[in-house]
Image (cartoon, grey):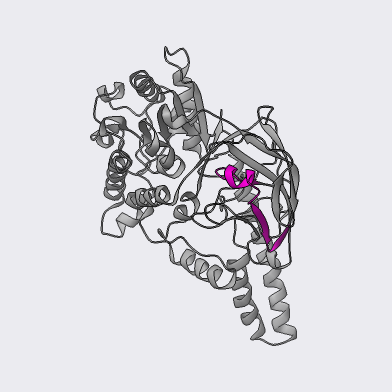
Amino acid sequence: MSRKQQLLKRHRRNKRIVLLVGLVLLLLVGVLVAWWLPLLLAVLGWVAHEAWFADHLFYSPKDDYCYDFGHEAQQVAVRLEAGRLLLDSAPELGTNETLILGVQVKSSWIGRFLDPAIEVLGGPSADRQAFERGVNGLRYLNLSGLAGPLVRGELQLRGRFCRIQVQPRLLAWRDPDYRRQRVMVIAPHADDAELAAFGLYSQADEAWIVTLTAGEIEAEHYQAMGMSPVEAARIKGRLRAWDSIAVPRWAGVPETHCVQLGYFCLQLPAMQADPQQPVASREAQLSDIRLFRQFNPFPLPADRDGLPTWDNLLADLRALLLKARPEVIVLPHPSLDPHPDHICAQAAVMQALEGLDWQPTTVLGYANHLHDNDRWPMGDSGAGVALPPLFDATAALRPWCLSLSRAEQFDKAMALGMMHDLQPPAPFKRRVRRYLQRWLAGRSGSTYGENEFFRKAVRRHELFWRL
């Protein structure tokens, strides 16, 4: 069982205990006070839960984030005076540095009900990076793309429903411009490349998009159209295979650089456990991956037999790596992103690279999911991406951040809108929860689309980690 599953299991167990205790108290109120009062309290309690306590937050907001950034960062002395962030010296900062500022954030009492945030003013446009309700600890603000106003002394920080105190050192990293190199984005599922790296691959001089699975499961939306479960799974897989080839064209990636490997969703761990054993689809009644590879621009090793095995996956990846010869590989981060297919995708690429004639110069990791906070990145569409929660600094993490203009964010939002998996409406319960959170907790949805990934992914930053 993964750490994410363990945290979710513990969360659900604790929730059941709280519900049981609450039910007993409501029964006592009904017996001792009035029969109708428990009904009213139950409704009010449910509304309060959906508005303020429904987040999957598997840690205390009072815990400090714990990062080891290594020794490569340039440390710049800063101070906060009357809300203005000032440098103690005048270092040379370019426009492409990754800039991270540690901040002690203490929520006000309102910040226990409305998302506390730090407003960053003085740049080309205002930014607001949000944190957990009730936060009281060390967090990391992302100031990438704001070197100009920072050096000129124009940058202002203002707490919203919180008080802030900056750390005395701003961390700055200077990297090559990876957009000027050959980039290969590894997507476990169609839309992962767009969620994590559309801004990067759309601006790259040469980009390849490699999608590992068809993502054919959980096809209830298509079953509602009258299809059988098998028919629904197959058509969903075909649609997502098409998306993985077609949507990168919106960013100018040639069709010849888009590849769908067609392995089956959530079956990569089983394939990895027994590399020569074929692992069939859970829902599509298929044990041949070639149905989902029909849009590929050229043949690959596994096309010979179509078997969904780990050995075939490695052979496909080795062929692609030798053909594309990427200088930069972008893939899921092995410890930040807990999705089992994402973990296996990273492992497969690293195994495929072993002993290969071509080796990339840079590997960048991304996280489209987290273990312990389902809302990260917190805040609204268009906002900056503060660093994610981390409480185990056993390995150094080296961030690299790409800043996106409003026009680039619009293009990314349209690319996500083309993805069939992000189009179905949210379940009724989730829509009610969002309505309550909008009116009671001040949260707004994304103007780009109903799916939560529009809020999470269409931001002024794309955040990666050098591996």
Image vertical order of residue 341 relative to residue 62, above or below: above
**Which image quadrant: the C terminus?**
top right
Quarter that holds the N terminus:
top right
Q: Quadrant of residue 216?
A: top left
Q: Is residue 154 magenta?
A: yes
Q: Is residue 404 left or right of residue 440?
A: left
- The answer to whether any part of residue 120 appears in the image is yes
**Residue 19 part of the magenta segment:** no
> Which residue: 69% across, 27% down?
71
Q: Position of residue 339 (x, y in %)?
A: 51, 40
In this view of the protein, which residue sits in the foreground, 173 or 275? 173
Percent position of residue 48, x then y = 62, 71
Report the label total. 0
The front one of 118 and 312 is 118
Corner quadrant of residue 259:
top left
Q: Is residue 359 above or below residue 249?
A: above
Query: Can residue 63 be seen?
Result: no
Residue 196, horizontal then vertical, whole percent: 46, 41
Residue 226 falls in which quadrant of the image? bottom left
Q: At 56% from the left edge and 53% from the top edge, which residue is drawn?
A: 375
The magenta segment is: 141-163
Residue 302, x across and y down, in percent: 30, 24
Judging depth in this view, the residue of 162 and 109 nearest the camera is 162
